[in-house]
Image (spheres, rainbow, N blue to C red):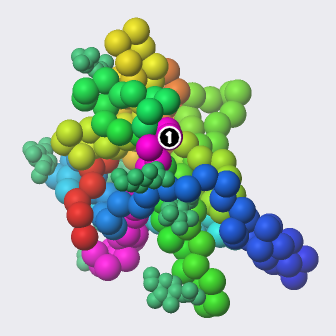
Amino acid sequence: MKSIATLCLTLLAFAIGSHAQDYNQSASFYLNLLSSDPYLNGTGLVPCHTGAAIENLCSAAILNQTQALYGPFQFNTSTEAATANTPNSTAGQMGVLTYLLRGSNFNESEALRMDFGYTSNMANPFFMPGNEELMVAFDSNDQLNLPVYTDTGYAPLYRWYLCNNSYYYKYRSIAWVIGSGAPDDASCCPVGIYRTWV
Ligand SMILES: *[C@@H]1O[C@H](CO)[C@@H](O)[C@H](O)[C@H]1NC(C)=O
Ligand SMILES: *[C@@H]1O[C@H](CO)[C@@H](O)[C@H](O)[C@H]1NC(C)=O
Ligand SMILES: *[C@@H]1O[C@H](CO)[C@@H](O)[C@H](O)[C@H]1NC(C)=O
Ligand SMILES: *[C@@H]1O[C@H](CO)[C@@H](O)[C@H](O)[C@H]1NC(C)=O
Ligand SMILES: *[C@@H]1O[C@H](CO)[C@@H](O)[C@H](O)[C@H]1NC(C)=O
Ligand SMILES: *[C@@H]1O[C@H](CO)[C@@H](O)[C@H](O)[C@H]1NC(C)=O
Ligand SMILES: *[C@@H]1O[C@H](CO)[C@@H](O)[C@H](O)[C@H]1NC(C)=O
C-alpha cells in the first residue's frame, strides 16, 4: 500500500505545474442529468473517487450527496484551440472540462479524459492529473457533447449513458458509447448532461 501511495504522490508531483498550454477558465458550474427516469432527471453528477487522484462522474442521486458536493466543474478554453477547431453553430466552443481536486496541502486542476478498450464499445470518462485531455463542448442549451469533424464543421455527438455496472466500486457512473449502436453493457440507460452555473 505504501509503495503505491508513494508512486501516486510522485506522479502527482510530476503532474502539478506541467501544463504546457494556457487557458481561460470559465466560472464554476454543476453538471446535471437529463433522463426519462423522473428519479434521475435534473439530479447532479459528482466526481467520485475511484483511484489515487482519479475521479469518475457518478450519479449524486444514488450517493445522496448535497448540492455543495456536485463538483463544481469548470470549462477551460483557449483562443488557439478555438481558431483551429471551428465548431458548427450548434456544437459550441471546444475546451476541456476540469475539476479542482483539493488535497490537504495542494490543489490540482484535473482535465476530463476518456479510457476505452478493444473489446467493448463502452468508454469511461474520468478526471486525472496530467496533460492528456479530451476536447468537449457545451451547446447553446448548455448540453455537454463531444464534437466530431464533419464536412460542415464540428458537429455535436451526445452518447452519454448512466450505467449500473460501473468499473469501480458500487457507483452508478457515466459512460460514453463508441459508435451509434446500443451499449454493450445492458445496464446503461441514455442520459443527457447539462451545466447550471453555481
Ligand atoms: C427532465 O427535466 C427537463 C428540465 O427540467 C425537462 O425539460 C424535461 O421535460 C424532463 N423530462 C422528463 C422525462 O421528465
Ligand atoms: C438515499 O436517500 C433515500 C431517501 O432519503 C434513502 O431511501 C436511500 O436509502 C439513500 N441511499 C443511500 C445509498 O444512502
Ligand atoms: C483569454 O481571453 C482573452 C480575452 O478574450 C484573450 O485575449 C486571450 O488570448 C485568452 N487566452 C488564451 C490562453 O486563450
Ligand atoms: C485550494 O483552493 C481553495 C479555493 O478553491 C482555497 O481555499 C485553498 O486555500 C486552496 N488550497 C491550497 C493548498 O492552495
Ligand atoms: C484550467 O485553466 C486554469 C486557468 O488557466 C489553470 O489554472 C488550470 O491548470 C487549467 N486546468 C487544466 C486541467 O489544464
Ligand atoms: C451541426 O451539426 C448538427 C449535428 O450533426 C446538425 O444537426 C446541424 O444542422 C449542424 N449545423 C450546421 C450549421 O451545420
Ligand atoms: C439500475 O439500477 C437502478 C437502481 O437500483 C434500477 O432501478 C434500474 O432498473 C437498473 N437498470 C438496469 C438497466 O439494470
Q: Is residue 72 left or right of residue 49?
A: left
Report if residue 15 lies within the magenta region.
Answer: no
Tell me the residue that label 1 is attached to.
80
Q: Residue at x 61, y 90 (%)?
A: 104
Q: Quadrant of the C terminus?
A: bottom left
Residue occupying image coordinates x 27% and y 43%: 143
Residue type at the position of mark 1? Glu
Residue 183 drawn at (x, y percent): 47, 29
Snapshot quadrant of residue 14: bottom right
* Label 1 environment density (alpha carbons within 10 Å; few <14, some 14–19, many ≥20): few
On screen, 123 above or below 157?
below
x%, y% of residue 39? 21, 57
Q: How many marks?
A: 1
Q: Secondary structure at mark 1?
A: helix
Classify 172 as above or below 188: below
Residue projecting furthest to the bottom: 104
From what the image shows, is residue 44 above or below residue 185? below
* Segment colored magenta: 62-81
Q: Position of residue 103 (x, y in %)?
A: 60, 84
Instruction: Left or right? Give the position of 99 relative to 59.
Output: right
User: Looking at the image, which residue is at 44% across and 43% down?
Assistant: 79
Q: Nearer the viewer, residue 127 or 122?
A: 127
**Looking at the rendering, in which quadrant would you find the N terminus?**
bottom right
Q: Is mark 1 within 8 Å of ligand 3?
A: yes
In the displayed structure image, the side of residue 152 where residue 47 appears, left or right = right
